[in-house]
Structure formats: structure tokens, C-alpha cells
Amino acid sequence: MAIKKHLAVTSLLGASFAALGQESFIVEDLKVEGLQRVALGAALTHIPINVGDQVDTYTVSKTIKSLHKSGHFDDIEAYRDGERIVFKVTERPTISSIEFDGNKDIKDEQLSESLNQQNIRQGEPLDRTVLDSVEKGLIDFFHSIGKYNAKIDLEITRLPRNRVRLKLNFDEGDAASIRQINIVGNELFPDEELLNLAESKQDLPWYMFMSSDRYQKQTIEGDLEKIRSYYLDRGYLRFNIDSTQVSVSPERESVYVTANVTEGEQYMVKGFDFIGDLLGREELIKSVIPLKTGELYNGSVVTSSEEFIKSFLARFGYANAEVRTIPEIDDENKEVQLTLSVDPGKRVYVRRIDISGNQNTADEVLRREMTQLEGAWLSNQNLERSKLQIQRLPYMESVEFDVTPVPGIDDEVDVDFTVKEQSAGSFTAGLAYGSYYGLQFNIGVSESNFLGSGNQVSFNINTSRGSESVSLSYTDPYFTPDGVSQGSSIFYRNYDASEFSLIDYKSKSYGLGTNIGFPINANNRVNFGIRWIEEELSDLAEYEQTRVLRETFLDPENPDAGFEFTKFELSTGWSRVTVNRGLFPTAGSRQSLNLTATTPNSDLNYYKVNYNSRFYWPISNDHRWVFSTRAALGYGNGYGSTNGFDQVLPVQEFFRITEQELRGFDRNTILPRAVVRAPQNIPGTTLPDGTPAGSIGGAEEFDTLRLAGRIGGNAKAVAGMEMIVPTPFLDEENTSSVRTSFFVDAANVWDTEFNVDRYQNLQPDERARLDDYSDPSRFRVSTGLSIQWISPMGPMLISFAYPLKEQEDDDTKTISFNISNTF
């Protein structure tokens, strides 16, 4: 850009411009004309001339250069008016707005960030020289991704008050495709084997439209590095990529890539040793790193050994350890001696831990989850564990941390945790609909982070077809500073089993309880609890499976009366949680084992054992492909005796099956059926007038059987496998709220107390009505597709399932869904 530099000197003494070059004068006044946006004081800071200074042409020339370097002016002129110097400036226009159009491969945010780094932003003066360099950089970027025909048009529109609107119009054009990739010099491995390692593809046919043969420089460089690693991992220590050529066709639509390589020969590891300081743990490290003497050299093994040593030292505060492998190559014997140079550096301590982003949660709630402490040495293991434990809190959406060295101190750092909170609770009043519960009404308050304390408070009222419940609970996860939790609850429930495709009975119960939990370590926990329950069981019909319960507690004087029970339940449990996040985990597991039993002084004496597990194994590095398994096992029974009868597991405690456990089947349809056994009456003689004289009871072998509703059982087994896959046509921002998976479910509920041999003396057609409900092998199996969505209306689950194995009287369904709505 040309800059006018002109000094017009008008002297009252009649001195000429040429004479001024030889003479100087004393400045009595300074004046700057043409200022609009730039303040006079700001301009004067770039003028190294003061009133009273003696100046000449050279001094004024330096001043013009200083003003130009300020970046505020496009044009600068200087005049002498007597003993006054006048600087006439033209300010650079101010950028009023920046617009982008036609860009596809570079997002607006990336462009804005790039321009911002060059001080091209709204409100700043426009420097065309910088803009030209940005344009060249963008063109180079497009060339690196194969868009050799890309063009950029810079459109500058003048606006009033010396402002401009800057618009970058992109014509990216089509990306060049890779027509051919040639590897020259390879004899040990064929081209096909090496090119299969590459992400870049060449000359793909039209029907492989899901793949791409687009040229990208960074991808090619990464592919060549994969080939290098492939050779190094197989002992070819001298392998080298001698040169790489990229040729573009004249029409700039095709690219030809050629890599010239030297393979070399395989080398064995002659031995390895250490130099430097290993903190006295040389033998331990030597025994656990994967390097082995006498094996082929392997580049990946060497790298993993270095990383292991760094990670090991970082656990003890040596966060900046340097590990370098020095090879001593014996080309004659094709061997290599490896020396691992270890410099642990200084032990680094944490001076301060700062937390930001927690608008509602108190600092102490987050700090109590941290295993990295202030004043202790820095441990990457403790930092990651602290991040994970905070991220598992239900009111935390994301957690990140940065480690910043303390200025001037080489062995201290500050750790900054940045958290993003999510809704910790809600007041809900709304309607919901589910395939099983039908239309529901609920109202309640749920808060997982009550007043920022991390305590959980919940109050809920729910009504649905055949069920009403009210509950209030409170849990303090840190009842003691050591992480001992304490919770209390009170509840009321009214339940009509006949509304849920079960046998006829009604249950009304209320009670209260408390529990306490103890952490074993960061992942394991044990819990103990006690509950007092008052329960009324009514309208219980007489079935074979409820015969013992009825005979034990039946009032002979009022056989139609209900049963009232007082129960004291004791519970103990173990849980283990290693998942990487609370919602839609992609790695880790959840496991729990719980035992619940009533005390001997309870009216009902029984126990129940439940085990649940779910495992997640990521298949891809980005955790978008995940394999998951789950299992649930349960068993219960009675103990002791009452009124001369052995106690059994009461019917209201029988195990059931939910729609989420076995998709493709109606809820409870796989449960054992209740059996009604009735004696067959034999008619007596007939009187002369034709009226019957009565009847007499028949023998037991003439009893009849009738199958009633589903009743459940005292044993349960559920298993499942899922392949979690990326949801098609979904942008990355929504992947955390939608999950798609293909599944296989299997489940069975059986009754170990059911004895089919009791019915062997019946008539064959009656025996044929019965299945062996004590058989644990009567599994049902289904497969299908499941979509889970945390929608604005509430959680939604849609499943498309097909039964693979079913029984004759099972009710199946292809589609099931649940959706809730709050307002």
C-alpha cells in the first residue's frame, strides 16, 4: 500500500523546501487534522516531537513512520505553517461488520477466530495488507483439502462515518479426488495390504457413495505415518519414507500421490537398560513395561513403555518427566540395544485449586469429591479421578480442568476446574402415558442439589390405572466428611394387581425407613437400611400358589376378611460404579447386589436377593460404537413357620418383568399363571319326579384345573446384549441426548415352590393344561431396534421388537413406547 509522505514547508522567512533539508527549526506548536475516531491524545503518543524541540526533515519523516505503525491511518501528510507542524491524516475505516457467504468446509466460528487472531474484527481499523495475507492463508487451506479451484472474493462496502462492511464470498468448488496412490519400493508387503491401513481411498466406484476418495493433505500425512508405524511395529527399524510427490491433473479435479520407501531389514532387541533417576523403582518398572529382550523390535511397544514410565512417575508428582529411548543399532547382526533415558524433573506441588462455573453448587460440595488436594503433589491420576467423580454428580453436565504453572516458580502449579451445571431438580405437575401404566398424573418436587448442598430431596404424588402412591425422601450423601451417606423416606401406596394383567388382589401399604451407606473406595459402596411397613392385603382369590399364605393367616370366622401384616425389613447392599458418565455412558459398568429380609418378629418372614449389572465396552475410539451387556438375577423365599405352616414368599413380593427388561412382549405376559383347582362333583340319584337328590364329592383324580391371571414367581433371570450405534442424520450437538441400539433380550420368571408332580394323578386332559412353572429354562427371547431420546417433552423410549422364542399363551407386540410430559 502506497503511503504519501509529503512535507510542504512554508516559511515566513522565505526558506525553500531544499533549504529545510539543510536547516532545522524550533517547533512552537503541533496540530493533527483529520481525526475522527482516534483521539488526539492517542495520536500524540505516536508523535515523538514536543513543543520546543528542534526538528528537520529527517525528524518529521520518522514521525510519519511512527504514525503509520500505529495502524490507525491510511494516509499521512506533514506541513510546516510558520513554526507549527501540521499532520494531516486519513484514518483507516473501521470494520462495522464481517460476513461470510458460500463457506462449507470452514465454519463461520473458525473464520471469525482466524480473523480475530489477525486483529480483523468488528470495531477495529481495516488493514488491507493483513487481509491479503489472510486471503492467501485461506487459499492454502483449501488446497490442502483438495479444493484447488477455490476462490475468495473480498467485498468491502463503504459506509457513513468512515466505516466499512467486510464480506468474504467463497466459491470453494469441488474437491479433487484421489485417482491413484502409488507406493514405490515396497517388496515385503503388497500395495493392497499397506493401502488398507490408509484412511484415504483411491478412485472409488459410484456405488461406494458412503466412502470418500477426497484428497486431504493432513489425511495423507497421517496415512503415511500409519504405514511407517506398520513397518516399525514389525521390526523394520531402518524403514524410511524417502519422498512424497503429489501431482494435480490439469483440470485440478484429480490427484496422484506417490510415496517412495526404503523397507530395510528386521532387527531384534538385544537388550534394554535405563539411565537417569527412576526413584529407586527400576526393577519394578523393568518388570512391568512391555519391552522384552530377544523379541523383534516394535515401535508401539517402545512408545507404550515410555508413556507407562511417564504415567508412573506422574502418580508421585513428577508431572513433567521426560523419557527418551536411545537406540544403538548393530547393522551387522541386525540387533538394537535400547537405552531409556529418564529425567523425572522436579516434583510438582499444587498451590491452589480454583473452581468456576458453579452458580448454584457450593464449592465444598465439589471439593469433597476431589482426591487431588491443595498442598499435595500433582497427580494426573488424582486429577482424572476428581474429574470423574464430579462428573458423576447428577447436577453436573460437564467438567474440565487446566493445570497452570505458577509464574516464577518451577515446582508449583494451580489447577482450575471449570464445571457446567445442569438442572438439579424440578417442580412437576403433568400427565404421562405409557404402554403399561396408561394415562398417569403426577405432581412433585425433586431436587438433587438442595440449596446447593448436594443433598437430595424428593416429594411425589403419582396416580395411574390401578396404582396410587405418595412418597417423601431425603438423602445426605455426605452425612459425615468421610462420605458416609444417610437417607430417610416415608411412603403410601394403593395397588390393584388385576389392572396389570395379574391375579386378583389389592394391596394397601404405608411405612417409613432409613438407610446409611459407607464408601469402600471411589467405586465401591455398601449400604444398610431398615423399614417399618404396615400392609393390608384384600380380595385375594384362592389359587394353588396362594394356598399356603391363605391357610397360614385365614380367619376361619371371617374367611372373606383381608390380611393385615406388620413388617420390619432389614436390607444390605453392595454397589460398584465405574461408568464414565451418568447419562448414556459409553464405558465402565454398574453392578449391585442387595439382600432384603424381614425380621423374625414380623408377621411375614421372607428374604429376597437381587443382583443387577450393566457393562459398556467402547469399540471405536470416539465411543460412538459401544457394545453393552446386562444381567439381572433375583431369588426370594420364606423362612420359619407360622400356625404350623412354613412361611413362603408372599404373592405381593413375587418378581415381575418390565417392558424395558424384555422388549417385544407385553408386561408380565411371561409370568407363571395362577392355578385354580376345583373338585369334580358327582351327581346323586334322581327322584321319581325327576329332581336330583343331591351330589357327592368325587375323588381327587377327577379334580379340574383352571388357569387364571399371571402371578409371578420367586426367581427371576434377565439377560441382554446391545450394540449401540451412531444415530443416522443427527448432528454432533444432539448425540448426547439420543441413543440408538440393536438389542437381544432374554428373560424368565419361575416359581421354585411350584410342584407339578402334585397334579400327576389328574386326568390327562387336565394335566395338559399345566406348564411346569418351576422350570428355569422357559426363557423368552426377542431382538430389535431401540431409540432413546431425552426430548423437550420428557424422556422417550421407542422399541421395535420381534420375538425369537415365545410360549403359546404369550402376548407379544412389535412396537412399544413411553413418553412423559410436564408443564
Image: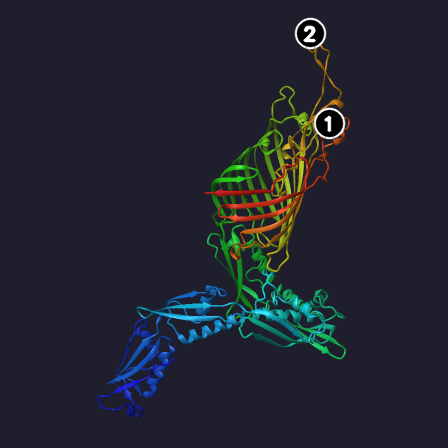
Q: Position of residue 276 (x, y in %)?
A: 66, 73
Q: Position of residue 437 (x, y in %)?
A: 55, 37
Residue at image coords 46%, 67%: 111
Looking at the image, is 506 positioned above or below residue 79? above
Mark 1 secondary-structure assignment: helix
Front residue (pair 114, 450):
114
Residue at image coords 48%, 55%: 358
Q: Amino acid at mark 1?
A: Glu
Q: Amino acid at mark 2?
A: Asp
Looking at the image, is 389 positioned above or below residue 474? below
Q: Quadrant of residue 322?
A: bottom right
Residue at image coords 69%, 9%: 690
Q: Position of residue 130 (x, y in %)?
A: 43, 75
Q: Exactly how many numbered labels are in the figure?
A: 2
Whether residue 795 sits left or right of residue 568 in the image: it is left
Can you tell which of label 1 and label 2 is closer to the viewer?
A: 2
The residue identified by callout 1 is 766
Q: Quadrant of residue 21?
A: bottom left
